[in-house]
Amino acid sequence: MPALEESQGVNKVVDSICKLSPDLLAETEFQRTGVRCDHEALQNIIRFLLLTFRSAGKSNLSGDDLVKRLEEGSSKWPKASLQVLHRLWSEHSASVRAQQEVESALSIGQLVDMQWKLGMAVSSDTCRSLNSPYVSLLLKIVEPSGQICQKSFEMTIPQFQ
């Protein structure tokens, strides 16, 4: 759930949500129903609900646990709105969790630094006069966990091209 220390902002969003009827809260398109809601309030509602449902998915919360956390975050929740959110979470939690599993399986590290140098191999264990150019690469990658790792390798010029 959004952090409790942000309860003032949470209360503001909950106030905006409270202005919506439970039927409207369950509606997928506000404008079609004729409801006027200022752009910023609507953005805050969407952000809050996205963050709430993502957090509930990561925490593997049940519908009851989600409602309990929402009530802990703000005392302003009307029972009807909480029932709608409980029903929506119960219906869609499996797909949210499945999407999160796919995202975590597909997540890759981000390249943050690359260093390279061109060198000349003059000899090796098996050949006394190689005289072969090579490229040495050092990659710094931030893994999805936040840990920085380094990968280094050498390639011949044709491999590099």
Image: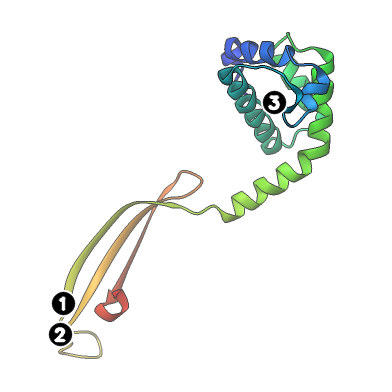
Residue 131, which numbered label? 2
Q: CA distance from mark 3 to mark 2?
A: 72 Å
Q: Is residue 129 above or below residue 134?
A: below
- Left or right of 28 in this view: 139: left
Give the residue type that dot 3 points to: Gln
Would residue 108 appear left or right of 122 to someone viewing this image? right
Query: Is residue 117 rendered to the left or right of residue 60?
Result: left
Q: Are marks 1 and 2 in contact (CB under 8 Å)?
A: yes
For disc 3, the marked residue is 31
Quarter of the rendering containing residue 54:
top right
Whether residue 85 is visible to the viewer of this picture, yes or no, is no
Number of the front mark, 3 or 2: 3
Which residue bears the numbered disc 1? Answer: 120
Quick one: label 1, few (<14), some, or many (20+) residues within 10 Å?
Answer: few
Name which residue type carries label 2. Answer: Asn
Identify residue type, mark 1.
Met
Q: Nearer the viewer, mark 3 or mark 1?
A: 3
Question: Residue drawn 72% across and 44% down?
Answer: 97
> Which comes sooner in the sequence, label 3 or label 1?
3
Secondary element at tag 3? helix
Q: Tell which circle, 1 or 2, labels the residue nearer the N-terminal end.
A: 1
Residue in the picture at 15% in, 85% down: 131
Residue 46, percent across and down? 63, 27
Q: Name the image quarter holding the N terminus.
A: top right
* As drawn, 65 above or below 158: above
Task: First in sequence, mark 3 or 2: give its number.
Answer: 3
Where residue 41 sits, quadrant-wise, is top right
The crowding category of the residue bearing disc 2, from other C-alpha atoms within 10 Å (few below 14, some 14 to 19, many at least 20), is few
The residues bearing labels 1 and 2 have C-alpha atoms spaced at a distance of 6 Å
Instruction: Tell whether label 1 touches label 3 (CB within 8 Å).
Output: no
In the rendered structure, are the residues bearing label 3 and label 2 in contact, judged by CB atoms less than 8 Å apart? no
Q: Position of residue 14 (x, y in %)?
A: 68, 14
